[in-house]
Amino acid sequence: MRKNTRKSVTYVGLDVHAETISIAVAEGESRARGRSVGTIANRPEAISQALKKLGPAQSLRVCYEAGPTGYVLYWQLEKLGIACEVIAPTLVPVKAGERIKTDKRDAVKLAQCYRAGELTPIFVPDAEHEALRDLVRAREAAKKDQLRARHRLSKFLLRLGRRRDTKTRAWGQVHWQWLDSQVFAQPAQEATFQDYKNEVEHATERVSRLEKAIERAIEEAPPRMQELVGALQSLRGIGKLTAVTLVSEVGSFERFPSASQFMAYLGLVPSEHSSGGSRRQGRITKTGNAHLRRVLGESAFCGRLRPRRGPELKRRQEDQSQAIRDMAWEAQKRLHRKYGRMTLRGKSHPVTVTAISRELAGFVWAVARQRERELAAAS
């Protein structure tokens, strides 16, 4: 008789924290319950020793939930020759009646669900993608800090009845000249103003420094990443920073067999609650990658503009194939038509932008997959 290889596999669930890791195993058939093995320190040598006691590396299947500890443990297990998957925490099955939660129970549940095939793994980026993604997210955090600093300064001046000329561009050269001309009779208010103003200047310098670092990182990135960044910029509304964000967050677009799956990954598809003969759809799910959903929402504003190829867009499309240029032109026409139809139907602006973002996500997937196929054919 043919040997059942499933019985020889040991499924390991790890509940990972900054200092400790709880380990549980599930062996044999799915009816056998998992058991806790113990808790170890979250150190490479302790992890290696603990897993060696569980059996040969070839017989282990390890999983743990994605979290603040990152992918260090994943890479360590890969070096040891142990198959490992990082699990999406929000998609782990939860029983309605459970009221007790401990690290050991969580590890046992991971092991049992992993053996039953009920867990959803996430994409683990390689070192280049993770480094670029960290840099892009640092720039995003800096932009948020800059916005908060600007709000603090402008609202402080508003409380004192000081308003800039609204005909001038906010935070432009004339605006800064107006800020430099402000004088306060109270020393305490002068100190507050200077502190807020210095914070805005510091945040602006930080954003500029990180954007220059992103430029250098792209120049030093692998050729495949550079090609994808260039191809995505063929789409109107997607500049270099947006394209870098898409490539660093997604990694490989090959892992999405269709555009609809990419839209679902971004959380741009409507939620649904259907039963029997009724079908009800609600707001978008907002599951998946919020960073990508935000940048596509910003790019979707270009859908309100009439289709045209300006000098800058033509320059970005120079090195791209005719197929990608045609997709980019079709994207402009289709997004503008959709914007017009939804506006005539009286749809609200947020609903319209969300719908255009979903359409734009489909074109992003199509352009990226086309460029990936071209690179594969050329290699």
Image: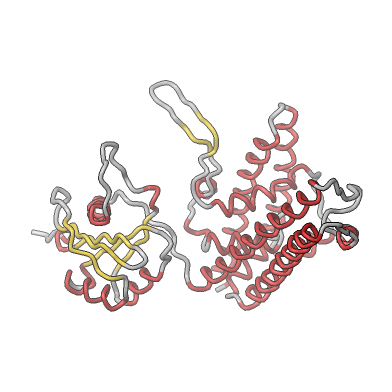
In percent of width and height, residue 55 lies at: 17, 71
Q: 271 above or below 134?
A: above
Q: Nearer the viewer, residue 82 or 212?
A: 212
> Residue drawn at (90%, 61%), measured in percent from left and top?
181
The answer, for residue 22, to whether it is visible in the render is yes
The quadrant of the picture occupied by the N terminus is bottom left
Q: Is residue 57 left or right of residue 244?
A: left
Front residue of 152 and 40: 152
Residue at the extreme left: 1
Q: Nearer the viewer, residue 197 or 368?
A: 197
Give percent across and percent down for residue 357: 64, 45
Left or right of 335? Residue 375 is: left
Q: Residue at x 87, y 53 (%)?
A: 169
Residue 317 visible: no
Count the numbered circles shown.
0
Rendered residue at 62%/53% (across/down): 364
125 w.r.t. 285: above or below: below
Specify the quadrant of the image occupied by residue 226: bottom right
Which quadrant of the rendered structure holds the C terminus? bottom right
Horizontally, residue 256 falls left or right of residue 210, namely left
Q: Residue 296's spot in the image, x, y percent?
A: 64, 50
Question: Between residues 116 and 104, which one lies in front from this camera angle?
Answer: 104
276 versus 14 height, above or below: above
Coordinates of residue 378 in the picture (x, y in percent)? 58, 71
In the current view of this chain or complex, which residue is farthest to the top? Answer: 277
